[in-house]
Image (spheres, helix red, strand yellow):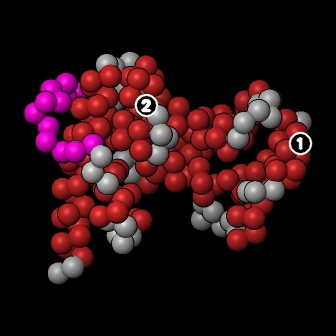
Amino acid sequence: MLFRHFSRNNWRDLNNKPLINQLILDCQKNDGQAQRKLYEMFSAVLFSVCQRYAENPDDAKDYFQEGFILIFQNIKKFRFEGSFEGWMKRIMVNNCLEKLRNKQTIYYDDIENLTIDLEDNLEDEYAEMPYDLLLNAVQQLPNQYRKVFNLYVFEEMKHQEIAELLGISVNTSKSNLSRARVILKEKLIGMNNHINK
């Protein structure tokens, strides 16, 4: 199992900055035990990032393993400025985006024809829905919509940042988010109706 070593103690360790800093220093010296401990501590958090971008569990596992290899290859570049978890998440997100870059994408530029309110809060409406169903709905979004949705909602990026990162216009970013939310809302309503039958 991917996270067989993950325990409640690891959650406490995630807030132990001196421990994390020491593990980073040891990993920068290629210490295998430190690498294993760091992997165990952050596996669940970072795998959930990959799950949101991937279309299926196998892709998510591949993105995750490749992302961790990149983390260990680049850990000497971490300068102890800002959040280490945030630094690792950026590597995971960038790796996921790189893997998705060559897949077919669909763009919608005509945001005037979309009726969904961007401020519509899906989290409140579907707060009781199990996480795995929500994740499944996000994974079913077309690649381009899923990328923009994840970057906007989970990475909290602005449309200008998303546009620059993905090489699209700001309007395309906005319309893809709008379209993603329309599709996601339809899928979640369908799932919710199925659960309540």
Which amino acid, mark 2? Lys
- Quarter of the image that includes the N terminus: bottom right
Residue 115 visible, this angle:
yes
In the foreground, 99 or 90: 90
Is 1 placed above or below 42 here? below
Side of 28 relative to 173 (left or right)? right
Crowd rating for badge 1 (residues with CA inside 10 Å; few <14, some 14–19, many 20+): some
Q: Which residue is mark 2?
A: 158
Residue 134: give x, y in percent of width and height.
Answer: 35, 60
For residue 26, the mark is 1
Which is more toward the observer, 188 or 66? 188
Q: Farthest residue to the bottom: give it.
A: 197
For disc 2, the neighbor class at 10 Å (few under 14, some 14 to 19, many from 20) is: some
Residue that appears at 83% across and 42% down: 24
In the figure, residue 168 lies in which quadrant?
top left
Looking at the rendered structure, the secondary structure element under dot 2 is loop
Q: Position of residue 62 (x, y in %)?
A: 52, 44
Question: Disc 1 residue type?
Answer: Asp
What residue span does the magenta drawing correspond to?
Answer: 107-118
109 in magenta: yes
Is 188 within the magenta?
no
Q: Please tell me which residue is depicted at 14% across the width and 37% down the height of the picture.
A: 114
Left or right: where does residue 194 sit relative to residue 32?
Answer: left
Q: Residue at x 72, y 36 (%)?
A: 82
Helix, strand or loop at mark 1: helix
